[in-house]
Image (cartoon, helix red, strand yellow):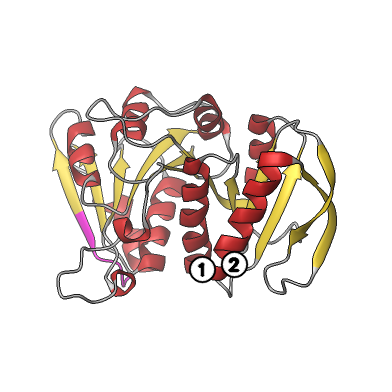
Amino acid sequence: MSTDTRTITVGIDGSRSSLDAADWAAREAQRRRLPLRLLHAGTEPAVPGGVFDIDDMDDIDDIDVPAGRTRAALDRAAIELSYAHPALDIIARRTATPAVPALLAAAVEAETLVLGSRGRTGSAGFPVGSVALGVAARADRPVVLVRAGELPEDERVPVVDGSPPSTAPYLPVVLGLDPDASADDLIGYAFDTAAVRSAPLHVVHRWSLPTSTLRPWRHRFPGTTVREHCVDGDPGPRLLEASARAGLLVVGRHTGRGPGRAARSLIRHADCPVAVVPHD
């Protein structure tokens, strides 16, 4: 892979949540017309083998792949995604580097890094593993956390006329914005994500937001419908409510710091995938 080509990269560990995250990542790669990179990190012994080049299933890359479950998970994910997205450029890789440093290194070359969480556990929210939280707290690029059980139709408006779910419009992208923060990277990611989906963008913030904050982005993305929601006090409950009708919730963290308490609560309780975006 050329170092100047960004990818959508997803961590694969053989769990159901990581495979569902890979399916979400494949759809995101297709939307953004980027390669999809499947990455397993860890110290499981490797044996000589091949990794599928999805553009031509007869082509084999001469690299090592892990034995047992990890090899099966990588191969299965690559094969299933190749059938679901035949035009997508898919690269499967393994490294013996421990998960957190390997994923942080991979994020440097990624447009977005995608990780799985562990699914629904009722009203108390869902657990987020130490790897996912550690990477989301330190990555240089946006990290999207996807729960087990996330389906393609979950990011689209429900259909009522019997038409295929894949033809339905996308649900809104919801952005939680702190008016006191300088967050161009965060705002830009949210606008760009809404634009590639042709989805509306809902911006939730406290107090009054200066018109200059969003004006340049509205001009840059004139086709994106933007709705602002100003709340008094803690915007967390409004963001959680909005996440039930959203395709993606976008929250920020200051570069060099992990997500704050409010962002961590949203990560655990939101009803849709959550993108954690570093910004100044």
259 is higher (above) or lower (below) than 41: above
Residue at the far front in the pictured view: 68
Q: Is residue 127 above or below residue 49?
A: above
Report the number of numbered marks.
2
Q: Answer yes or no: is residue 115 visible.
A: no
Magenta region includes residue 209: no
- The residue type indicated by label 1 comes to Ala
Q: Tags 1 and 2 in contact by the CB under 8 Å rule?
A: yes
For the residues labelled 1 and 2, the Cα–Cα distance comes to: 6 Å
In the image, residue 259 lies at what x, y percent? 43, 28
Residue 264 as seen in the image, left or right of residue 158: right
- Would you identify the image quadrant in which residue 90 lies? bottom right
Left or right of 154? Residue 83 is right
Query: Magenta segment range?
Result: 221-227
Report helix, strand or loop for mark 2. helix
Q: Nearer the viewer, residue 34 or 3?
A: 34
In the drawing, does residue 63 fall left or right of residue 181?
right
Picture coordinates of residue 146 (x, y %)?
Answer: 42, 44
Residue 224 percent location from the top left of the image: 30, 67
Q: Residues within 10 Å of mark 2 (few under 14, many from 20)?
A: many
Q: For residue 91, what is the image quadrant?
A: bottom right
Q: Against 79, is 258 above or below?
A: above
Residue 225 in magenta? yes
Of helix, strand and loop, which one carries label 1? helix
- Residue 216 position in % (x across, y down): 36, 60
Q: Which residue is mark 1?
A: 84
Q: Residue at x 31, y 47 (%)?
A: 175
Check disc 2 and report the residue beneath it: 82
Q: Is residue 83 left or right of residue 5?
A: left
Relative to the observer, which residue lies in front, 241 or 84? 84
